[in-house]
Image (cartoon, helix red, strand yellow):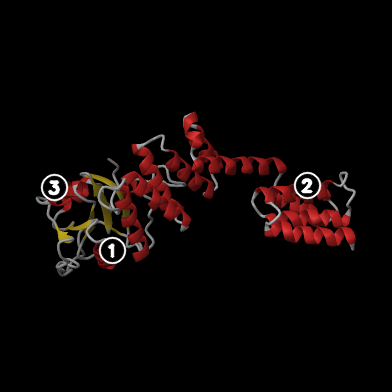
Amino acid sequence: MSNSPFGFGGGNAPGGNGGGYGNPYGAQTVSKAPAGAAPAPAPGADAGDLVKDTTTAKFSADVLQESRRQPVLVDFWAPWCGPCRQLTPILEKAVRAAGGRVKLVKMNIDEHPSIAGQLGVQSIPAVFAFVGGQPVDGFMGALPEGEVKAFIDRLVAMAGGGGEAGGDPVAEALDQARAMLEAGDASGAAQLFAAVLQHEPENGPATAGLAECFLDAGDPARAKALVDALPAEANEDKALAAVRTRLKLLDEIAKLGDPVSLAGRLQANPDDHQARYDLALIAQAQGNRDEAATQLLEIVRRDRAWNEDGARRKLLEFFDAWGPTDPATKEARRRLSSLLFS
């Protein structure tokens, strides 16, 4: 067991050292209540069945046992903690919006300090997520509403919830992770993909998804190691094939040279056709067809005979690869005709 809420989950996430949820508003260090502080009621004390307060004696039933039925969030707070009062209404709203897929249990650490001590809580607010009787993730600090909702969505998907009865929890988690990745939440997606791989280490779509997260984080070496570790039969997965293609293109680009350096050469000498040619190949590898065509057309305009008409011949190869109806092909053909026959 880690001695802080940041030891949970996300261990395979790009750049992650645990839960990775941060503390943008500043949690308060756990200590005795300030002298003279008046007792305050529990935030949202009358919040309904989905939200309740607990005690040390009831913790096992309210959290450990209940988390075997659905995920349970535990909010460690204190009456004197300002950020706690920011976070609790947000938690309650997000839990209610989840429609029973998750419950919230609040624990006043001034009155019940032992559980927080066992979990290594050193600052509050601190939120722990329990699934199957075990803490699986957590965050510290008063996160904004959108991040709390995303945290709950990840937790529900990780626990196999959120879908129709009888659905495949792995498939549901993969769908949720893919949606997060497409929405730009690579960190959240990586945690879900990693959670699937903990249960199914050779799951091709989960491996491909996590590898994409590493690629998006600028860590192709880790993505390649992850993909290469799979058995040969997994190569038939389409998502893995796409990742391998992306890795191959990155290798090709690396062999061509640094685009920034090549651009610098062109700025110093606009007639450095080799630099321009290499930039065209890099643009093509990155899927930037218009830029690739523009660079090759500029070589044709400046010196058609360069490299035995190599720029025009390479452009024709691109046309074949793109197809005759592709907008980039049509536009580049028009511009090429203008250069050749004007």
* Earlier sequence position, callout 3 versus callout 1: 3
Q: Nearer the viewer, residue 210 or 315?
A: 315
- Disc 3 marks which residue? 60
Identify the secondary structure beneath mark 3: helix
Residue 94 — which label? Answer: 1
**Mark 3 and mark 1: Cα distance apart in space:** 24 Å
Residue 314 — which label? Answer: 2
Q: Residues within 10 Å of mark 3 (few under 14, many from 20)?
A: some
Residue type indicated by callout 1: Ala
Q: Nearer the viewer, residue 10 or 203?
A: 203
Quarter placement of the C terminus? bottom right
Identify the secondary structure beneath mark 2: helix
Q: Which of 50 and 135 is in front in this view?
A: 50
Q: Residues within 10 Å of mark 1 (few under 14, many from 20)?
A: many
Q: Assess whether mark 1 and mark 2 are in contact (beta carbons under 8 angstroms).
A: no
Residue type indicated by callout 3: Ser
Q: Which of 270 and 77 is in front in this view?
A: 270
Q: Assess whether mark 1 and mark 3 are in contact (beta carbons under 8 angstroms).
A: no
Q: Where is residue 104 in the image (x, y as percent from the top left)?
A: 21, 58
Identify the secondary structure beneath mark 1: helix
Q: Residue at x 9, y 50 (%)?
A: 57
Q: Residue at x 72, y 53 (%)?
A: 292
Residue 267 — which label? Answer: none
**Residue 168, picture quadrant:** top left
Q: In this view, does 145 lie to the left or right of 241?
A: left
